[in-house]
Amino acid sequence: QVQLVESGGGLVQPGGSLRLSCAASGFNLDAYVIGWFRQAPGKEREAVSCIRSSDGLTYYLDSVKGRFTMSRDNAKNMVYLQMNSLKPEDTAVYYCAADPSPGHFTIRTLSEWWMYDYWGQGAQVTVSS
């Protein structure tokens, strides 16, 4: 059974950092497409960072480039999102997602939330002074 569990959310001041973790079970991360998404109240879910492990095809939301970094630890079957220089507009529920069909994705669809089959429960990130 595929399961994703996020952790590491919380309250942080503007300019601060947080690292989100996503523990995957029931599948091997390196065979899947992995993504971090977020959804703020009243807004649509948007991709933050996504990667197709088979060839390294990667997406980052423009507003987080240079501040956020996604990484994997295949031995632990973990995915991380390091978030630095956080801004109030980064406040959202952050979700880890995975999909077992890397061949279905292109650079355009890598960031489309509806392409992903498996989702974690979400982690709240609040950036506020």
Image: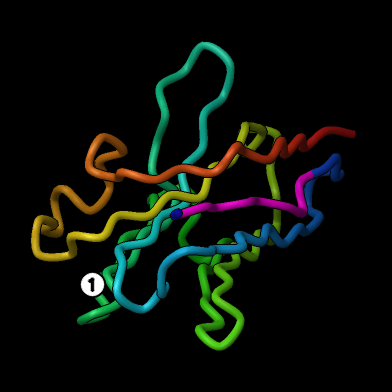
Mark 1 Cα-neighbour bin, 10 Å: few <14, some 14–19, many ≥20? some
Principal secondary structure, stretch drawn in magenta: strand
x then y, percent, for residue 70:
51, 68
**Above-or-below relation of 74 to 118:** below
Quadrant into which the C terminus falls: top right
Instruction: Specify the quadrant of the image occupied by residue 126.
Output: top right
For residue 115, side relative to residue 71 (left or right): left
| Magenta-colored stretch includes residue 126 | no
- Determine the residue positioned at 41% across, 72% down: 29
Residue placed most toward the observer, 11 or 52: 52
- Determine the residue positioned at 85% across, 45% down: 12
The residue at which mark 1 appears reads as: 57
Residue placed most toward the observer, 60 or 4: 4
Quadrant into which the N terminus falls: bottom left
Q: How many marks?
A: 1
Residue placed most toward the observer, 35 or 5: 5
Q: Which region of the structure is painted magenta? A: 2-9
